[in-house]
Image (tube, grey):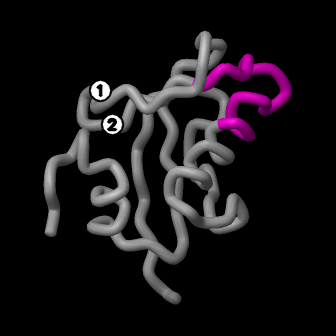
Amino acid sequence: MADSVVIDVHVVPGAARDEFVGLHGGKLKIKVAARPIKGQSNARLLKILSARLSIPKSAMEILKGSASRGKRIKIQGMTESDFKNCFAEFYGETD
């Protein structure tokens, strides 16, 4: 499948638990329990996104912000509409 979507996320590392919080300045805000040490929080971020979106971690790539809270992630095999449907509680109905 040639579809892909690029998303912007705001990550809060070292949280008490993994949680999708909502929108923060137009970005999806995600709390991850992993600390930002040696890429642990990035790995955890991709793992929880993978589970939520039902796609393999290998279909995702951090394009920008690997060392900051603001990240840009490319997701292969998914359209923007598909992505927003997976997070309808934050983006509203998109169909």
To which residue does mark 1 refer? 24
Please provide the residue range marked out in magenta.
32-44
Residue at the (40%, 44%) spot, across then down: 8
The extreme right residue here reads 38
Q: For residue 40: magenta?
A: yes
Disc ID at residue 94: none
Q: Residue at x 16, y 62 (%)?
A: 94
Q: Is residue 69 visible?
A: no
Q: Position of residue 74 (x, y in %)?
A: 52, 60
Q: Is residue 66 magenta?
A: no
In the rendered image, the vertical position of residue 49 relative to residue 58, given as above or below: above
Kindly indicate the quadrant of the structure image that contains residue 48.
top right
| Amino acid type, callout 1 | His
2 and 1 marks in contact (CB < 8 Å): yes
**Which quarter of the image is occupied by the C terminus?**
bottom left
Q: What amino acid type is highlighted by mark number 2?
A: Lys
Residue at image coords 51%, 39%: 71
Residue 15 position (above or below residue 25): above
**Extreme residue in the bottom direction:** 1
Say if residue 83 shows up in the picture: yes
Secondary structure, mark 2, is strand
The crowding category of the residue bearing disc 2, from other C-alpha atoms within 10 Å (few below 14, some 14 to 19, many at least 20), is: some
**Does 64 sit left or right of 23 as displayed?**
right
Magenta span dominant secondary structure: loop
Q: Residue 91 location in percent, x, y?
A: 21, 46
List x then y, in percent, for residue 44: 70, 36
Q: Residue at label 2?
A: 27
Q: Secondary structure at mark 1?
A: strand
